Amino acid sequence: MKVLLHCCCGPCLGGSFPILEKKIGSGNAAVFWENPNIHPYVEYIQRLNSFLKLSDALGLKVFKGDADYGLNRFLANLRGVYDERRCETCYSMRFEAVAKAAIIHGFEAISTTLFISPYQNHDLLKEIGEKTAQKHGLKLCYVDFRPGFKNTYDVIRENDLYKQKYCGCIFSEYDRFKNDKKLKNPFKEPESS
């Protein structure tokens, strides 16, 4: 089975790809980049460069979707929904993009490095991946990459890759930092008597 693997960053690629190759065999996968959710622009470029650096080091064939910074597109797709349904929108956008690229480039199946994260909603991610694959006449190559998550730290060190600190979207950035004591909003602090 030929699989087009959607990638969110270099470290997740490094932890996922060896597991994927064990499942489908060496030389049967290529990688794909389209991540309109990643914010801010500097974060987007750092993750893209990290992905490209590791793809090159591994000798992988890289395909790209809409590689422009996609914040406007991501926010437009949310249609004012900023709660936990934002992840559903994000997953759908990225699976749609990789599925369309898979068809164009002759792949039979799609997958994503998002399956490596212990912080993602795997049930929802798998459900959206299966629906999207079926809609486009493809298969979802589901692999629970989470056992490779701890290896991402070695991949980062060995390849001098950028290490992100949150999922990628503007909302996950806020969730990541909102309780950081160094970043407290002084107007939100209780007044002392």
Image: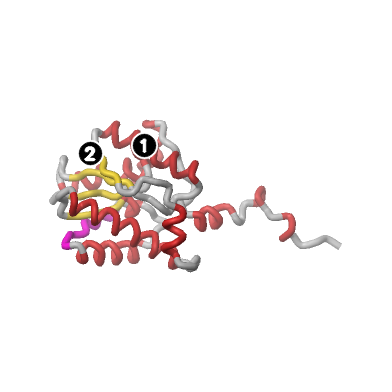
Range covered by the magenta-colored residues: 137-144
| Label located before the other in sequence (2 or 1) | 2
Say the numbered circle drawn on residue 61: 2
Q: Are circles 2 and 1 on residues that touch, CB within 8 Å?
A: no
Q: How many residues crowd mark 1 within 10 Å: few (<14), some (14–19), many (20+)? A: some
- Across and down, in percent, residue 114 comes to 34, 53
In the picture shown, does residue 54 fall above or below 111? above
Q: Amino acid at mark 1?
A: Val
Q: Nearer the viewer, residue 93 or 1?
A: 93
- Across and down, in percent, residue 91 comes to 35, 60
According to the image, what is the colour scheme of the structure? Answer: secondary structure
Q: Residue at x 60, y 56 (%)?
A: 178
Q: How many residues crowd mark 2 within 10 Å: few (<14), some (14–19), many (20+)? A: few
Side (left or right) of 21 relative to 33? left
* Main secondary structure of the magenta stretch: loop
Residue lying farthest right?
A: 193
Say the numbered circle drawn on residue 155: 1
In the image, residue 73 lies in the stretch drawn in magenta = no
In the picture shown, does residue 87 fall above or below 157? below
- Across and down, in percent, residue 136 comes to 20, 62
Q: Quadrant of residue 151?
A: top left
Residue 147 can be seen in this image: no
Q: Amino acid at mark 2?
A: Lys
Q: Residue at x 26, y 49 (%)?
A: 5
Q: Residue at x 49, y 67 (%)?
A: 80
Task: For marks 2 and 1, give the CA distance.
Answer: 19 Å
Q: Nearer the viewer, residue 155 or 9?
A: 9
Residue 133 can be seen in this image: yes
Residue lying farthest left?
A: 1
Side (left or right) of 62 relative to 50? left
